[in-house]
Image: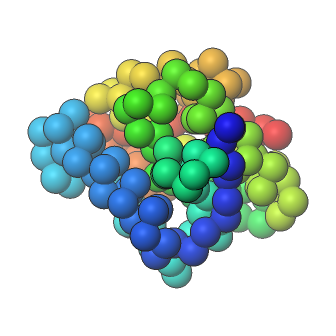
Amino acid sequence: MTMIEERPWDDPAGSSLRRAQETELDLRYGLGNHEPGPLPSAADIDVFLVALTDDGHPLGCGALRRLSPTSAEIKRMYVTPPARGTGVSTAILRALEAAALTRGWTTMRLETGPGQPDAIRFYEREGYKQIPLYGHYIGSDISVCYERTL
């Protein structure tokens, strides 16, 4: 059974998951700077969720950054390798979408990249459609952007 909890950005489990994601992205892209936009922080993340096993072991995380009064961007969506393919990523995404709706955000956007074909397949399977690069990602050769209306 997976529990999903809203946690503060600096939560130890969430920080550990984000570090693991950074390590994996460094390997995938072969560089340490794979964030074309401003790094997410406690100051600009409105929702941060952590997925855990019943005994509290962290499995994954995801965050929302408000873009406008009706839209939000998914940030730091990550699931540990052993938990992939178990439904954890879908559960986190659905919880993020539900959190967005409670705040009146009906448009979800996200940025991923060509070094993450598994993420691209996941978002497309979940109904996200590729859109032109937006905001800080315009001109980035390591970005692919998606959107879904809830």
Count of residue discs:
0
Up/down of 103 relative to 81, above or below: below
The residue drawn where x is 65% and y is 32% is 90
The answer to whether one can see residue 66 in this image is no
**Residue beneath the point at 57% across and 52% down:** 55
Q: Position of residue 126 (x, y in %)?
A: 67, 25
Q: Is residue 90 left or right of residue 83?
A: right
Relative image position of residue 105 (x, y in whole percent): 79, 56
Which quadrant of the figure contains the N terminus?
top right
Q: With respect to residue 32, does 81 lie above or below?
A: above
Instruction: Using the image as rendered, state which of residue 20 and residue 140 is in the foreground.
Output: 20
The percent position of residue 131, horizontal first and vertical second, equals 57, 32
Q: Residue furthest left?
A: 30
Please name the residue shown 20% across and 54% down the image. 33
Hey, which quadrant is residue 6 in on the image? bottom right
Residue 53 percent coordinates (x, y): 58, 46
Q: Quadrant of the C terminus?
A: top right
In which quadrant of the rendered view does residue 93 lie?
top right
- Residue 82 shows in the view: yes
Could you tell me which residue is drawn at 52 percent across and 81 percent down? 43
- Classify residue 92 as left or right of residue 137: right
